[in-house]
Amino acid sequence: MQKLLSILFLFVSFQALAGDDPKLLVRELNKKFNQISDYKADLFMEFNIPGVKMKNLKGKVVFKKPNKFKIKAKGIFFLPKQNPMQNMSEMLIDTNSYTSIISGYEIVEGKNCAIVNIIPLKAQDELILGKFWIDIKNPLVYKSQITTKNNGTIETKSIYGSNLKYALPDKIIVKVEINKVKVPKMMSVDLNKKSKPKTGIESKETGSIQLNFSNYTINAHLKDAEFVD
Amino acid sequence: MSLAIQLKNVSKHFGDFVAVNDLSFEVQQGDIYGFLGPNGSGKSTTLRMIMGLIKNTQGEINLFGKSLNTNRSAIMREVGCIIEKPDFYNYLTALENLQLFARANQLNFKKADFEQLLERVGLLGREKDKVKTYSHGMKQRLGLAQLLIHNPSLIILDEPNTGLDPQGIIDLRNLILSLNKEEGKTILFSSHILSEVQEMCSSMIVINKGKTIAQGKVDELLSHEKIHVKLEVIEVEKTSQLINQSNWNELFDKMEENVFVMNMSKDKIPELVAFLTHSGVGIERIDYRNQLEEYFLKITNQ
Amino acid sequence: MKEFIAILKNEIIKTIKRPRSFIGFGIIAFICLMLQSAFYHDGKEILSFVTGQLENVFNVEGKVLNGNLICFIVLQTLIVQMPLLVALVTGDLVSGETANGTIRFLLTRPASRTKIVLAKWIAGLFYTLLLLIVLGFFALFVSHWIFGDGDLMALNSEGLTIISADDITWRWGYAFLIAFLSLSVVASLANMLSCIMDNSITPIVTVMAIIIVFTIIGMFDLPSFDIIKPFLFTTHMISWKSLFEDPIPFHDIWFSIAVLIVHIVLFISISIFYFNRKDINS
């Protein structure tokens, strides 16, 4: 009983400790990332971009440490300038390059998440602010909001399945704010389309790309040839 | 003899303008028929109506006893024409043009047929040249080839001598006569030159301002007419007295300055000359106009 | 029928042997090669004009600059020029013969005027088809040879539609058919004006003027113009582009096809009616 209580105490105290300490949360998360030397998975991409109509696309994703990452698919597709799969681990791994603070807590996907803010130490860094919603029980990023100098803000939501151990999601939904793509009529020559009344100020619209991963093969010693077109 | 062409009370109005007014005439098969009139008299309009290029406003046009309105296709197989001038596809060769003409007439021409036709009009050896390189005379000859390609029994020619040199005119006249005499083809041709009609035609119609002035056999039309004899004398007073006091007074028409104009037949000229010279009148010049020309100029008030 | 085939053969021979017929082929080849050359050297810069809005946020992956896109752009660019080329030849088919006098020969042969107008009209359509075949060769085959295959990023005023390379061949087939139908309207209009007018320049200039005015009306996004746009045949000439939308607005396409066919029937009927009553004074 005493043993059981001590285990329970240790667990609770870790929870309390981890819940308060962003570095500890990130370290736990990085541990998961560090287990991966490479992976390969099937990918199914669903696009919902304002002003762009396209079919969903099948492909493959391959990753190899330190920073080889490639999505292989036939045809034209769009990927966020900030690659959520790659950026998250790269951003968090060098703990000396940023300051992290917890700005609050929020329930995401039924998980009690700490909102960890990452602020780079160097002003010349591309990153302005990174916000990660990390489950304090089992440190995994369920939501992120990354603001960079050149590429604006991108928001992701991750849903995990069988690869919790490696912090590899089954689904990532990337949300972006974008001006609806419009082609000038002089260029599109759409004589058969009726004009639409102008609404005045053109507001940004939200688009999303959903990346569904399946059939992960982890640490299978991927060859570099996998990353060549 | 059956009729090749029959026009009954044919009129053509262009808006308020009456180009042809109640015209009727008949061309017998085997005839060379002259269609005479000054420029703008309605000749071309009439020929174009006969060929179906212009629709008649009133009247009836029959060819070979059939109405042009209801039998145009069958009639046109029997008719060849050159209206105004022969025109060709200048970017094609003469042979290519003839091939088009043969096909338009549904003729199954072989190479030898084309060669025979080209030889007849004197263009064999030049058939592969583009028509745009042809001289006016060569185009006229190609026009004849186009005209004859389907061996029509009726040939309609609108002012065929226009633009031809004297030799060309002679050649064409000989060809028309030979087509009529040797091959029995009926020929209708228009002209504003009397001598052409006089020399070739057996019958004629003369029109002016769209109206018929006279028509019939050329010989018959002329036999009713007296010629104008113009007598230029030195002593006008004396001559005037002599004529007034004699039977010649009945034939006197008018004075044109010092010229006496007499209305009389050609064979009385020696008698008149004898009368005046015996009376001591010196004759400077005696002149009489071509019969048909005189007639034509008279009736058309030219 | 035999007679009609004979005169049709004559009309086709005349049409394809005319020097001006080759101007159209030359212009199409020139425009295609010029656009291909421009895209070969500066394609990415030209494309960024359209994809720039996306490239702020996304990386555009895959081969955007491919044979399908170039063909699409060429077809879109030539929507104004092609009718002019069609009119250049078809606007002269009857009036050209009236002007140089050969019409007298044609109309004094056994074939009826209706058959002659129809033969000339079909010869005009045949030339239009040849123009499209030349266009298809340069725009589609040469572009594929230079730029390769790939998904089509189709541009329309609503934005972009990405069409998979596997799903595009049939669309090109139908697009060229609709383009042929559209240009047939132009050929029929030119033929009609050619029957009415006696010189070869006026029908061509009139067709060009009609197309330019109608196209400008179509280009302006003014609600007041929307009322008249459905009645302008130029509005429906671009309906081939609808095959590159997702989902394909089949209802709109069928409506456009119907409008184009009605125009063709109307123009050819007027041509036959007028030509049968026309006096040949030339």
Image (cartoon, coloured by chain):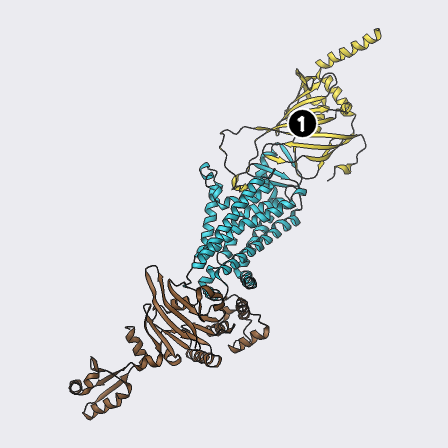
Chain colours: A yellow, B brown, C cyan
Chain letter of disc 1? A
Q: Residue furthest bottom?
A: B278
The residue that appears at 54% across and 77% down in the rendered structure is B119
At 47% across and 51% down in the image, what residue appears? C208
**At numbered mark 1, what does the secondary structure look like: helix, strand or loop?**
strand
* Residue C41 visible somewhere in the drawing: no
Q: Which residue type carries mark 1? A: Ile
Picture coordinates of residue A86, whole percent (x, y): 71, 29
- Against B197, residue C91 (above or below) is above
Q: How many marks?
A: 1
User: Residue B141: horizontal and vertical position, in percent?
Assistant: 48, 74
Q: Which residue is mark 1?
A: A173
Estimate the x, y position of residue B96 in percent, counting from the top left: 55, 68
Q: Is residue B270 left or right of residue A5?
A: left
The residue at 68%/32% (across/down) is: A45
Pick out the residue farthest to the top. A2
Q: Tell me the quadrant of the picture where the N terminus of chain C can be found.
A: bottom right
Instruction: Compare residues B171 and A150 and report the one nearer the observer.
Output: B171
Nearest the eye: A30 or C30: C30
- Percent coordinates x, y for residue C232 in the rendering: 48, 45
Location of residue B223 (image quadrant): bottom left
Quarter of the C terminus of chain C within the rendering: bottom left
Residue C94 appearing in the image? yes
Q: Decide: few, some or many residues near mark 1? Use Cα within 10 Å; few <14, some 14-19, many ≥20.
A: many
State left or right for residue B256 relative to residue C48: left
- The part of the image, by quadrant, that contains residue C150 is top right
Residue placed most toward the observer, A154 or C236: C236
